[in-house]
Image (cartoon, helix red, strand yellow):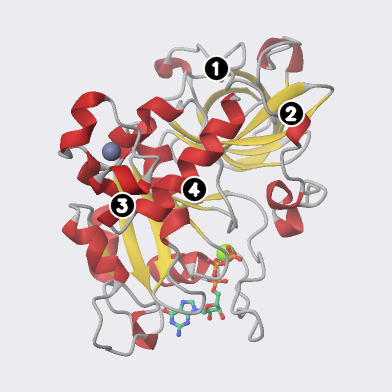
Amino acid sequence: MAPKFKGDSDDWLDNERLGKKGRKRPQKVVQARGLDLPWIQANATVEEVYPKQCRVRMDGEGQAFLCSYRWAEIMNRSKTEARERTPVCVGDRVLVDTEDHRSGVVTGICSRKNSLVRPAPGRDGQKHYHALAANLDVLVIVASVTEPEFSPGLIDRFLIAAEVQKIPVLICASKMDLWKVQGTKPLWKDYSDLGYEVLPVSSRDLVGIELLRQKISEKTAAFCGQSGVGKTSLLRVLLNREVGRVAEVNPLTGKGRHTTTGAVLLEASRGSRWIDTPGVREFGLVNLVPEDLPEYFPEFRSLACRSSGCLHHAPEQCEASTLFRYASYLRILKSLQEETS
Ligand SMILES: Nc1nc2c(ncn2[C@@H]2O[C@H](COP(=O)(O)OP(=O)(O)OP(=O)(O)O)[C@@H](O)[C@H]2O)c(=O)[nH]1
Ligand SMILES: [Mg+2]
Ligand SMILES: [Zn+2]
């Protein structure tokens, strides 16, 4: 088994916060050189990425095996531009040079249709970014109704990251078997009221699983969300096999244990490719300036103050403050402003 990233056992991006020194005007994320192979020339898909190798699966009934990279052609060597952490990411379409279908070299990558990207800690004054998954037909945002608590802030960041890249989204309100009906309206209903597609699911009693399967059938779908919300458990029931590892949430903190440590593409039947990703505590946004943020909150678009270019940053001055995602909006605005100041 090839080695994992050092520190990935607790998603290293969450531990190594971006230092203040590293905060500058957002750099345009530049794709690595070699990312321009015509799609027709690709013969494999990346299933898992390690520090110096990746596992690919050849098209058709092809084998999966480890590959190295032809570095000079693939990595962007610029010292000034934001740079990707690894030469390829899960879901990349690549050209593999292999003789025995047991090992090979990645010699080119296709231009990505889209990707789920977050900032990564930089090195030597250069900004890095981390593409978790690429070429998605749908992003499945998993948020448990409880254990851990439903977390709107993280959902909003995933929604924005997907919309920036024009990736369709589906929100799964998971662990429905644990939901006890209370007087107040559940938070996930607020998201369906805003027009997002929300699917209540439980991998324990199989609620919503067939519908979820239909929605992601024959698609490349990445499952993302906080640690412990049940992403791997959902994939296990969807695939009907013991993929990855699952662990209980910490009973003291109610938080997940970062059980899945790296993104992995799982081949399902009939062209369905489903990607499990590691749980995160936070998700930084790239390629987004503060002025554009209101556009990613559809319920803000019709506010009268928007016509005068209001950024809704002063609660006492505009109507946005009454909306349920306002606190989340303000936090994201603040972090984007810090990055550009
Ligand atoms: N009651 C209940 N528990 C669930 C359900 N789905 C998952 N769990 C439990 O939640 C815990 C975490 O599940 P995982 O599938 O490991 O969660 P994850 O989102 O993959 O977590 P990371 O890999 O850390 O990101 C495990 O103890 C599961 O048994 C569910 O539908 N209902
Ligand atoms: Mg997992
Ligand atoms: Zn306003």
Disc 2 from disc 4: Cα separation:
19 Å
Going by the image, does 271 lie left or right of 64?
left
Label 2 crowd bin: few (<14), some (14–19), many (20+), radius 10 Å: some
Label 1 crowd bin: few (<14), some (14–19), many (20+), radius 10 Å: few
Going by the image, does 202 lie left or right of 132?
left
Query: Label 4's element?
Result: helix
- Considering every residue shown, the one lying at the far front of the view is 316
Going by the image, does 250 lie left or right of 236?
right
**Which circle marks residue 331 in the picture?**
4
**Which circle marks residue 321 in the picture?**
3
Q: Quadrant of residue 10?
A: bottom right
Name the amino acid type tagged 4. Answer: Arg
Name the amino acid type tagged 2. Answer: Gly
- The residue carrying mark 1 is 28
Q: Residue 25: x percent and y percent?
A: 60, 20
- The residue carrying mark 2 is 22
Is mark 3 in CB contact (under 8 Å) with mark 1? no
- Taking the image as drawn, is residue 218 in sight? no
**Which circle marks residue 334 in the picture?**
none
Q: Please, is residue 121 above or below residue 177 in the view?
A: above
Q: Which of the image's four quarters has the C terminus?
A: top right
Q: Quadrant of residue 132?
A: top right
* Nearest to N terminus: mark 2 or mark 1: 2
* Nearest to N terminus: mark 2 or mark 4: 2
Disc 3 vs disc 1: which is toward the camera? 3
Q: Residue at x 48, y 22 (%)?
A: 42
* Nearest to N terminus: mark 3 or mark 4: 3
Q: Residue 47: x percent and y percent?
A: 57, 43
Going by the image, does 265 lie left or right of 10?
left
- Taking the image as drawn, is residue 286 in sight? yes
Disc 4 from disc 1: Cα separation:
22 Å
